[in-house]
Amino acid sequence: MVTIPVIAVLGVVLLYPTSEILRRAFTEFDRPQVGGWDNFSWFFSRPVNVTVLRRTVTVSAAATLITLLLGYPYAYTMTLVRPRVRTLMMSAVLISMFFGILLRNFSWIVLLQKEGALNDVLSAFGVERRTFLGTQGAVLMGMTHILFPFMVLPLYGVLRGIDRRLVAAAESLGATPRRAFLQVYLPLSIPGVFAGTVLVFVMSLGFYITPQLLGSPQQAMISQFIYLQFDRGAAFGRAGAMALVLLVVAVVIVGIAQVLVRRSRAYGESR
Amino acid sequence: MIDESAPGLGRRARHVLCVLIAVWLIIPLFTIIPISFSGLKSFAFPPKQWTLDNYRNLSDPVWWDALKHSITIAIVVSLIATTLGTLASFGIVRSRSRWMGAVRLLILSPQVVPIVIVGLGVYLVFLRWRLVGTMSGFVIAHTVMALPLVVVPVTASLETFDRNLERAAASLGARPMAAFWQVTLPSIRPAVLTAALLSFLASFDEFVLAFFVQSPSYSTLPVVLYRRMSDTIDPSVAAVASIQLTLVVIGVAISLIRQRRIERADQARVT
């Protein structure tokens, strides 16, 4: 009973509009497309679309991997340090997160531009000034910076709950610290890794602002292309087809990740 | 002190890495503050002329209107999302229906579906319903994005809530509503307040959906910021960013200090 208002709201404002845009993929066409799956054959027949789709997946995977490699040791350290230090570490994450996605992009524009602070530092070492904006590096820098909190928070939530006495027990039974970590601690942390990785990866797939502001057309991601279809030609059919492709990619990759995690857990339990 | 029991794993290297990450998270945000006092129409760092003009320019009604809209919308969204989300959390946690898994998935889906897809759909539908460029349009769209941020903490808190307290209240003659207001709500209040705060912030920061709902005559602060950021070099963006950064730092500091005090009080009670 109490869930009915939410279901009603989400049905009207989320499900209906989303299905509406996806439906257009099969009902609305711009010449030379006329019907059926034409919008999809249009999408896959143009190399630039495929390139952008592939780039979106690669860049998202790279951003996810970097945030995981930085976020895991950060969250791990947070579980070990004194409460005061932990508060400081947490506040760094929260301040960055609550500052807002748009303004964090803005700070990177300021830093990475030709007259920016990064160039000031580099030119002090005799490196010639150049603009970092409009490079893949700038986009990745902005994305990882924005996504970092979304990796650390779920990770920390899980790591905090892991009983360190299990690691101590493994060590007292003769395991080296490295082995105790790899065989006891790491497997217990997998749910957190999964939660953070999936959230960050799927968020990256939909990134729009960062590649738009820090990148150039050479770094365009699929969200920008979807928006262009709408903005330039109100080509809702093509936009819908792109949206459906993106959605399928997201669901398939998340599904694969879920199966892998479940399998690794089953493997761990069977031993 | 606990840290000493976890040697190996390159403790020192890990600590250095964490310090670097914290610096990377925070320093880019603060480079905006000197820029906000720049007297030149550039983001050169550090500024060569200093002025307060960028702050004076904020009296422009464009900024005030945008700020007023953003705050009003965020307050309404926070109230609606917290109420609906808390109700739905009760349904999800208490109901034995098999459908509740699906409901939870539906509520969380805005975090997973790439936002441009939702935005395009919302635009199509809102155009038909004449909600584009209206406050109701913004409120409805932002509520969808805020609901996951309510349901996650509130369901977590409800799952640990001891229902025997409610039964005790009932056995002492409390009607269900009285038991809810006097027993259940007070004990899940921290989660509900967190939810209200998070949904306020999510609405205040929402950009992509707002970009689809805005009209030239009615938009929110992020939309105006984005326009100023992408069209021209406008140091008043830096002034807005500096104000927001100051507020965020104060807010995070207050909430973490309060949390530490609560934790310390708990520890004192235990020992």
Image (tube, rainbow, N blue to C red):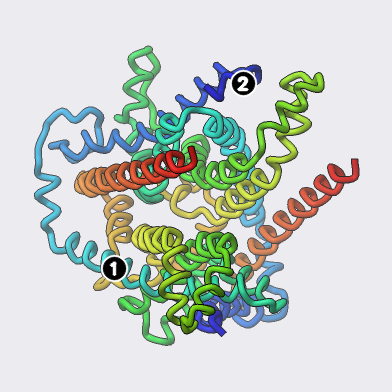
Measuring from the top left, give residue B100's x and y in whole percent.
Answer: 65, 74
Disc sitting over residue A38 in the figure: none
Q: Residue at x 37, y 85 (%)?
A: B130
Q: Nearer the viewer, residue A106 or A215?
A: A106
* Residue type beneath disc 2: Ser
Q: Provide the chain ID for the residue under circle 2.
A: B
The N terminus of chain A: image quadrant: bottom right
* Residue type beneath disc 1: Ser
At mark 1, the secondary structure is loop
Along the horizontal axis of the image, is A62 left or right of B144?
A: right
* Mark toward the viewer: 2 or 1: 2
Calculate the distance from the C-alpha at mark 2 to the C-alpha at mark 1: 54 Å
Q: Nearer the viewer, residue B271 or A108?
A: B271
Q: Are marks 2 and 1 on the same chain?
A: yes
Dot 1 crowding, Cα within 10 Å, few <14, some 14–19, many 20+: many
Q: Which residue is mark 2?
A: B5
Measuring from the top left, give residue B205's x and y in whole percent.
Answer: 36, 57
The C terminus of chain A: image quadrant: top right
Dot 2 crowding, Cα within 10 Å, few <14, some 14–19, many 20+: few
Measuring from the top left, give residue A154's x and y in whole percent.
Answer: 57, 47
Mark closest to the chain's N terminus, 2 or 1: 2
Q: Residue at x 60, y 80 (%)?
A: A28
Q: Provide the chain ID for the residue under circle 1.
A: B
Q: Which residue is mark 1?
A: B219
Along the horizontal axis of the image, is A176 left or right of B246?
A: right
**For the residues bearing labels 2 and 1, Cβ distance under 8 angstroms:** no
| Residue sitting at the far top | A125
Along the horizontal axis of the image, is B19 left or right of A222?
A: left
Task: Determine which quarter of the picture holds residue A119.
Answer: top left
Relative to A86, does residue A5 appear above or below in the rendering?
Answer: below
Q: Is residue A165 shown to the viewer in this render? A: yes
Q: Residue at x 32, y 61 (%)?
A: B223
